[in-house]
Image: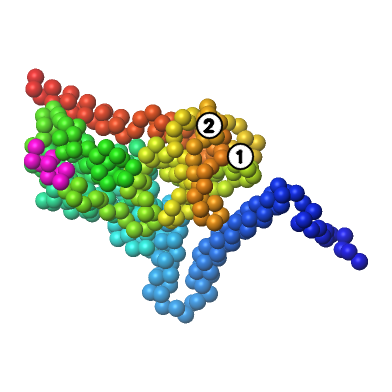
Amino acid sequence: MMDTETYFFNLSDLTASEQKLLQDIRRWKSELLNEIQALKDELAEVNSGIQALDSNGDESKNQVRAKQLSIGRKKFNMDPKKGIEYLVEHGLIQHTPDAVAAFLHGGEGLNKTAIGDYLGEKHPFNESVLKSFVHLHDFTDLILVQALRQFLWSFRLPGEAQKIDRMMESFAQRYCQLNTNIFTSTDTCYVLSFAVIMLNTSLHNPSVKDKPSVEQFISMNRGINDGKDLPRDILESIYDSVKAEPFKIPEDDGNDLMLTFFNPDREGWLWKQGGRYKSWKRRWFILNDNCLYYFEYTTDKEPRGIIPLENIKVREVIDRSKPHCFELHGDAGVIKACKTDSDGKVVEGKHTVYRMSAASAEEKEHWMKCIQQRISHHPFYDILAERKNRIQKTGSRLRT
C-alpha cells in the first residue's frame, strides 16, 4: 500500500524545462545545506572550546589561558568589538588603549582586515587605540616608502574613505614626529603618502593600462610642501622604489587579486537577491576599480561575481522580505556582469537588476553614495584635493 505522504513519478514524465528546474532546485538546496553546515561547524568549534574550559578544571592556568586566547582571537576575527570584550572580560588584556594596541600590534592569529576595521572605527576609545598602535611603530630615519611598507603590513586598510583618512592622518603625525627635518607639515606627509599608495595601485594593478610616468608623478605632487615643490630627487627615489617593488599585502587577506582590492572604496557584508530564484544570500562585497565584487566568504581567493559599474544606476527600493534595500539597474536590459556557477566555471550574468539589503539605513546610504561616486569619479581625489588646497592656502599666507 502506498504511503499517503510519498509520491512517485518518472523524470520522463516531466518536460525538459521542468527537469532543468528540478535540477536547479536540488542544487540550490544542496548549496544551502552546505552553508548551514559550515556555520554550524564554526559555531560548534567555538562552543566546544568554551565548554572545554568549563569542564577541565585540572588543566594548568597556562593551558586555560592559551585556550581562552585562541577563542578570543577567533571571536575578534568574526567580530572585532566582541572579541576585545571577551578578552577583557577574561582578564587576558586590560581595557586600555595601550594594552589593546599592543595586542593588535602583536597580531598573532589575528585577521589583518579585522584589525584595520577596529582601528578605523570613529569611537573615542578606538581612536585612542589607533594613536597607541601607531606609536608602537618606529619610523626613525626611514624614508617615507619604507615607513609606509612597515605600517601597511601590520593591518589592512579598510574600505571607507573617512576611516582611511583618520589612519593616514595618525601615520603622518607619527612619521613627522620621528623625522622632523623632512616635511614642513604633516599635511605634506599625508598627501604624499596617499600619492604613494595610489602610485602603487596604478603601477602594479593589471587593470590599469596607462601606467603613470615619473614625470606625471612629480607633476601631481607639485606645490604640496606648503605651496612649494618637494626636491625632485626625493620624488624620483619614491617612484623608483614603488616601481621596483610593489607593496606586500598581508597573507590573511586571502585573495590573490589583492592588488586590485588593496585600497577599496568600500567593503562589507550585504544580502544579495538571486536572479532566477529570489532567495537571499549573504555575500562579502568589495567596491573598487569601477567594479563591485562579491565573495561567499572574506577568505575566498576569487570573487563569486563581478559587476562592472558601466551604464549602471543605483536607486533605493522597498522590498517586503528585506529592509534597507537598494539595487543596481541599467537602461540597456541585462547588466554586463559575470559570476561562477556551481561547477566553478565563469559564466555571463543574466540580471536586469542587482538587489541588495544592508544591515541598517545608514549602511544602505553609505553603500549607495559610494557606488554613485565610483560610477562618476574616485572619492580619494576629493580628500587629496581638500588637503592640497589647505597646503596651498598655508603657503600663500606664509609668502605674504
Give the Cα separation between the discs numbered 1 and 2.
18 Å
- List x then y, in percent, for residue 93: 36, 60
Figure quadrant of the N terminus? bottom right
**In this rendering, does residue 382 appear at all?**
yes
- List x then y, in percent, for residue 72: 43, 62
Q: Which residue is painted at 53% across and 74% down in the image? A: 55
Q: 50 or 211: which is nearer to us?
A: 211
Figure quadrant of the C terminus? top left
**Which tag, 1 or 2, sits closer to the chain's start?**
1
Residue 217 located left or right of residue 119: left
- Name the quadrant containing residue 322: top right
Residue density around tag 1, few if under 14, some if 14–19, many if 20 or more, within 10 Å: some
Query: To which residue does mark 2 refer?
Result: 329
Query: To which residue does mark 1 refer?
Result: 322
Q: Which residue is painted at 35% across and 37% down in the image? A: 162
Task: Describe the element under mark 1 as helix, strand or loop.
Answer: loop
Q: Residue furthest top?
A: 400
From what the image shows, is residue 56 above or below residue 362?
Answer: below
From what the image shows, is residue 395 above or below residue 27?
Answer: above
- Name the quadrant containing residue 89: bottom left
